[in-house]
Image: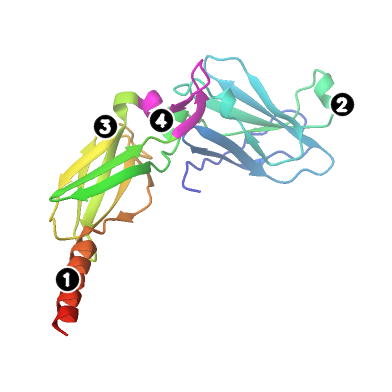
Amino acid sequence: MTDSTLLFSVFKGNPELPTAVNITWSSINFKTILQWQPKPSGYFYTVEIHGQISDTKKKCILTTETECDVTDALRNVKETYTAHILSVTSSRMDNFEEPPFAASEKFTPYNQTVLGKPEIRNYTQKGSKLNVVFQDPLTPYTFPNGSFQSIRDIFQHDLEYKLYYWKDQSSGKKDVTTKSHTFEISVDSTKNYCFYIQGIIPSRRENRNGQESTVLCTSVGRNILDGRYLLKFVIQSLAF
C-alpha cells in the first residue's frame, strides 16, 4: 500500500496464546485500517485503541480476522493513538486477567494519513487558457447534518494542490500551485496539453505528497488539425 507502514510488537500478560506481529496502519483520507498477522486458530483477537486524552475504545471484538477498520475510533485526528491487539479466548474476556497483547507503533491521523486522488470535474482549453476544476477527496467523517467532510474541511489552510502539465508528447513538465478548487494557466493555443493534480501538505515531514489524479489530455490541437484537413478535403472534392 501507499500509506504509513508501522511495525512493532510488545508482549504482556499470559504468554500461552500467540500474539499479533507485523502490525500496520493503513490510512487514506482518514479511513484507517489496522492489519496484523497471524491468522488465529483456537483463539480470537480484540482491538483496543488507546489515545493520549480519549477513552480506550474496543473494536472488532472476538474477531478471527487479521484486520480491523478503526476509523471511527480516531475521530480526534490530531491525537496520537496506539493499538493493542489482544489475543483472547471467549471465556477470558470475562475475567480480570490481562490477556497477552501486541502493541502497534504510535499513529497520528492528521500527520500520517495519505491524501487520496483529487477528482477532476471539468477542464477546458480555450485559446491560450487552460482551466481545470477539481474536487477534494471526501473523508469517512460527517458533519452534524450527515454530509461528508472533505480533506479540506479538516486540513484547511495546511492543504494545497499542485497541477503538473506538459505539452502532449513532450517530456518538459511544469507545475503551478493553488489553495482553491481551480487552476487557470497560460498555454500554447495550438498545442494539446496533458495534466494531473496532486494534494500536498507542505508542513509535513513525511507523506507530504498525496496520490496523483488521473492523467487527462486536451484535444484542441487535434480539432484544429482535423478542421484544416476537413476543409482541404472539401476543396479537393469541389475541384472534381
Q: Residue at x 41, y 38 (%)?
A: 115
Q: Indicate which disc, 3 or 1, sits on the residue closer to the N terminus.
A: 3
Query: Label 1 crowding class (10 Å Cα cut-off): few <14, some 14-19, many 20+?
Result: few
Of tags 1 and 2, the one toward the viewer is: 1
CA separation in Å, label 3 and label 4:
13 Å
- Residue 91, label in figure: 2
Q: In the rendered structure, does residue 109 fall within the stretch colored magenta?
A: no
- Residue 231, label in figure: 1
CA separation in Å, label 3 and label 2:
55 Å
Disc 2, SS: loop
For disc 4, the marked residue is 151
Of tags 3 and 1, the one toward the viewer is: 1
Q: Of residues 112 and 92, which is closer to you in this image? A: 112
Q: Residue at x 85, y 41 (%)?
A: 42
Q: Indicate which disc, 1 or 2, sits on the residue closer to the N terminus.
A: 2
Query: Label 4 crowding class (10 Å Cα cut-off): few <14, some 14-19, many 20+?
Result: many
For disc 3, the marked residue is 180
Amino acid type of the residue that numbered disc 3 sits on in the rendered structure: Ser
Which range is magenta? 138-155
